[in-house]
Amino acid sequence: MRKSIAVFNQKGGVGKTTTVINLSACLASLGKKVLMIDIDPQGNTTSGIGFDKNNLKYTIYDALINNVPAKECVQPTQQKGLYLIPASVQLAGAEIELTTFKERELKLRDIISEIKESFDYIFVDCPPSLGLLSVNALSAVDSVLIPIQCEYYALEGVSQLMNTYTLVKRNLNKDLEIEGVVLSMFDGRTNLSIQVVEEVKKYFKGKVYRTLIPRNVRLAEAPSHGLPIISYDPKSKGAEAYLELAEEFIELSEEAV
């Protein structure tokens, strides 16, 4: 089953990019062909998987604004089965440039439809905002994956996120579903983490993955080396958790078909 998923939460620092890189890399290690699309102007997925943001032939900006064919923007990563459409700082201007386009909310949908049949999964790393790039992502995909940090303000902003989801579903993408909720930075030694898990499960009934992503130093270090955690430290708790999440993700995706 071919599936496109936006990884979205307008709150920053919740583990969006960490989840995109590491879940994608683990799915690729399990034999899936996976594409990551970086539409965050910060380009953290691009640098976090080992690309130099100042030395890219084509980026998602070229596909969105200059109509460069999507397949020309796809780059192989160092890992077999894992590909990227990168982002550069140019993307910061795309939000404004897109406003002059007809059907500006649907540009990414056209790009994904050109290449969707070539991949098992496509993950879109969204900016931490509710602007036109995020709306493009939500309009283009089959479902939304929501990372939430196990911290005091975990559910802050979630109702706003759900309002955006509902508006896009009603007006631009009627088939949009919630893929699931990933809980990150879990610390089983604290009551707070455990309480947050319970709260999030109550809010997103039946949509929260069993696998919890722990706080893990090796996981935090991996992007500075341009590597997913399964390449950087395959025996770390972070690598084990993302591999388990990838297995759960495949199992639930295939059950849903």
Image (cartoon, helix red, strand yellow):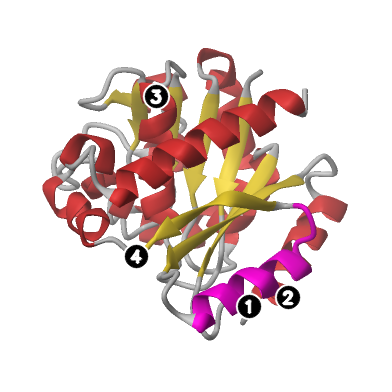
Name the quadrant containing residue 120.
top right
First in residue order: circle 4 vs circle 2 = 2
Position of 189 with respect to 198 (left or right) is left
Is residue 255 in view from this perspective?
yes
Provide residue 216's location: percent of width, then percent of height: 28, 61
CA neighbours of label 3 inside 10 A, class few (<14), some (14 to 19), many (20+): many
Q: Residue at x 60, y 50 (%)?
A: 210
Q: How many marks?
A: 4
The amino acid on which the numbered mark 2 sits, given as a three-letter code, is Ser
Q: Secondary structure at mark 3?
A: helix
Position of 136 with respect to 68 (left or right) is right
Provide residue 89's location: percent of width, then percent of height: 28, 56
Distance from the alpha carbon under mark 2 to that under mark 3: 33 Å
Please determine whether, in this image, residue 21 is positioned above or below residue 205: above
The magenta stretch is 191-206
Residue 255's tag is none
First in residue order: circle 2 vs circle 3 = 3
Please determine whether, in this image, residue 223 is positioned above or below residue 233: below
Distance from the alpha carbon under mark 1 to that under mark 4: 18 Å
Is residue 66 in view from this perspective?
no
Q: Nearer the viewer, residue 203 or 123?
A: 203
Q: Main secondary structure of the magenta part?
A: helix
Magenta run includes residue 200: yes
CA neighbours of label 4 inside 10 A, class few (<14), some (14 to 19), many (20+): some
Residue hosting label 3 = 28
Residue hosting label 2 = 159
Residue hosting label 1 = 155
Distance from the alpha carbon under mark 4 to that under mark 3: 23 Å
Residue hosting label 4 = 215
Q: Residue at x 47, y 38 (%)?
A: 244
Provide residue 77's location: percent of width, then percent of height: 25, 27
